[in-house]
Image: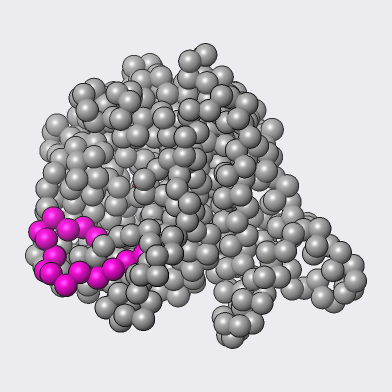
Amino acid sequence: MRKDLAPDLLRLKQKERNKSKKEKEEEEEEQGEEEKGIASMLPKDFQWGFATAAYQIEGAVDQDGRGPSIWDTFCAQPGNIADGSSGVTACDSYNRTADDIALLKSLGARSYRFSISWSRIIPQGGRGDAVNRAGIDHYRRFVDDLLAAGITPFVTLFHWDLPEALHQRYGGPLDRTEFPLDFENYARVVFAALPKVRNWITFNEPLCSAIPGYGSGTFAPGRQSASEPWIVGHNILVAHGRAVRAYRDDFKAAAGGGDGQIGIVLNGDFTYPWDAADPADQEAAQRRLEFFTAWFGDPIYLGDYPASMRKQLGDRLPAFTPEERALVRGSNDFYGMNHYTSNYIRHRSSPAAADDTVGNVDVLFHNKQGNCIGPETQSSWLRPCPVGFRDFLVWISKRYGYPRIYVTENGTSIKGESDLPRDKILDDDFRVKYYDEYIRAMVTAVELDGVDVRGYFAWSLMDNFEWADGYVTRFGVTYVDYENGQKRFPKKSAKSLKPLFDELIAAA
Ligand code: PNW
């Protein structure tokens, strides 16, 4: 750890890192052996690979006894998805596991993050409902095949696709008692079925279930409420806590000598004050981070919600019972981090609106001087800003005591990509640059700021169903030809990661 370096020295060292490989090699040759220590590196067992999620890639929604999820229902309602599409076929990955594993292997991935469809395991979702053997067998085979290919699985239990039956039965995560119990039951079924998996993620981005799902209504189940997002967030935290306790008590020791780990994945965009000299904007930028990430991170690492949230939301933010607090606090073996972009934040002087979810601030791409945070992409919310990644890694590390971090998603769409002919799509220099700059920013945080990053997953292994944006927005390092049998074509970015990590990971 070198947290004590002066800022100027840090900048100098960063400049050093940003030099091209060739420049550095030449310099190192000149400088001799002892100087090589500067380029300390990612640990040699660093896990890197690609990420996906069940509903975005699997298709096969009626196959082998799968029950419907809230995303099936949501997509069926006209107007919810930009291009009127759904995950009915997606990348057909349910039937192409061999292709996907071959793809991962050809790209040199060491690990793969994917999610399990709850309603394939328990079609009706609940703890009194039947378990679907065919669903379990599918994921057992998939894990076995990944391991046989030398690829380490990172398994997400919940990536937004709640069984529709639980939504109907009791409102899913709106129910403080039933939802955590049913999630724990589902998690236990999966832990028991997949004893070879050592890396578990309970929930992906609870914020995206809570706010787009129950606040703005832009994601399934499409509800619009000023109070429900905070209830949903709370109950997901408790459900996470229950699943972690179940894993630690009853599965961890048995599975491979107790070296398994489990955590939650939180998303967050980094923030900078709109007017860097205005204390109100500085505070607003912090408050935005608290509403985004500390909403979930603080209860897990510090035992309660941020004071800024309590202040603004009052009783709409549930209070932890002692039992809930004990479940949630300390429930992360690692911090799973999804990160894509950064914003400038301007404070508002008027009182917060009842349906405000961001901390009563303006979220902007330009600062007071008119500087833009980064170039446009196909996603209205995403503009590349690599230094924000470094700064955010440091923010999380300082706030939570330098936890072990896995970057579970990072990547970009490209403006107009879907309009291009295939050969141009495959030449995705914008994405190559994004990965290069973001990954080097991450390595700088490891080298110079003492941040403990153990793994990195690019989002995504392939173009897929981008939720409410449908298929027009492509996040893949692999092009998927949806018109011609879901055939996969690796883009330039797909092939760029192995050489990059070969350079950055310490030699064995
Ligand atoms: C993540 N936003 O979601 C998800 O985990 C992925 O499933 C998704 O495909 C990926 O990022 C790209 O979008 C997000 O509007 C969705 O700020 C939306 C936002 C952020 C993350």
Residue 369 in the image: above or below residue 381: below
Residue 455 lies, in percent from the top left, at 57, 54
Q: Quadrant of the C terminus?
A: bottom right
Magenta: main secondary structure equals loop
Q: Is residue 151 visible?
A: no
Residue 149 lies, in percent from the top left, at 66, 33
Residue range in magenta is 344-358
Please give the count of numbered marks on the rendered protein.
0
Q: How is the image coloured?
A: one colour
Frontmost residue, 103 versus 163? 103
Residue 393 in the image: above or below residue 107: below
Q: Is residue 43 visible?
A: yes
Frontmost residue, 422 versus 507? 422
Q: Is residue 346 magenta?
A: yes
Residue 160 lies, in percent from the top left, at 32, 39
Frontmost residue, 334 versus 208? 208
Q: Residue at x 11, y 61 (%)?
A: 353
Q: Residue at x 38, y 58 (%)?
A: 365
Q: Quadrant of the N terminus?
A: bottom right
Residue 43 in the image: above or below residue 260: below
- In the image, farthest residue toward the front: 370
Q: Is residue 151 magenta?
A: no
Q: Is residue 425 left or right of residue 474?
A: right
